[in-house]
């Protein structure tokens, strides 16, 4: 399953930190953030994740997150 989210992550360091954090909760998933995209797209690919939990975790770190 692949899901994409719109975020407001702007810096490489922030993106790396957020990806590491999410991978702790969803090991085995492929997670990346496209900072060049206007929507700062967070892409999650895997089998065992819940969209709502991803959005909650991203928001807990201080970023916005919405399903695209």
Image (cartoon, helix red, strand yellow):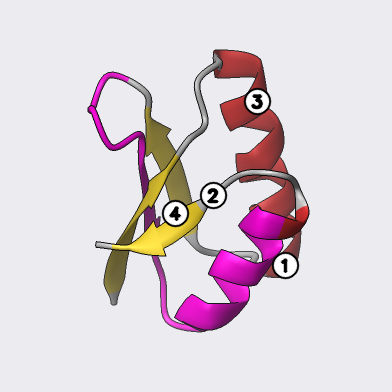
Q: Nearer the viewer, residue 37 or 3?
A: 37
Q: Secondary structure at mark 1?
A: helix
Whether residue 40 can be seen here: yes
Residue that badge 3 annotates: 14
Residue that appears at 65% across and 17% down: 13
State which tag comes first along the sequence, 4 or 1. 1
Decide: is 57 above or below 62.
below
For marks 3 and 4, the one nearer the N-term is 3
Q: Which residue is mark 1?
A: 25
Residue pointed to by mark 2: 64
Q: Quadrant of residue 60?
A: bottom right
Between disc 4 and disc 1, the foreground one is 1
Q: Secondary structure at mark 3?
A: helix
Cα separation, mark 3 vs mark 1, equals 17 Å
Q: Nearer the viewer, residue 61 or 1?
A: 61
Residues at circles 3 and 2 in contact by the CB criterion of under 8 Å? no
Disc marking residue 67: none
Identify whether 48 is placed above or below 15. Answer: below
The region drawn magenta spans 36-59
Instruction: Label 4: state its secondary structure.
Output: strand
The answer to whether marks 2 and 4 mark residues whose Cβ atoms lie closer than 8 Å is no
User: Could you tell whether 31 is left or right of 16 in the image?
Assistant: left
* Residues at marks 2 and 4, CA–CA distance in whole angstroms: 20 Å
Which image quadrant is residue 16 in? top right
CB within 8 Å, label 3 to label 1: no
Q: Is residue 49 visible?
A: no
Structural distance between the alpha carbons of marks 3 and 2: 13 Å
Q: Which mark is residue 30?
A: 4
In front here: 65 or 36? 65
């Amino acid at each position: 399953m692949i899901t994409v989210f719109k975020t407001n992550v702007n810096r490489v360091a922030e993106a790396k930190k957020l990806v590491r954090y999410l991978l702790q909760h969803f090991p085995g998933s492929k997670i990346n953030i496209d900072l060049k995209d206007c929507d700062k797209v967070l892409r999650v690919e895997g089998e065992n994740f819940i969209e709502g939990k991803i959005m909650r975790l991203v928001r807990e770190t201080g970023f916005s997150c919405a399903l695209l």
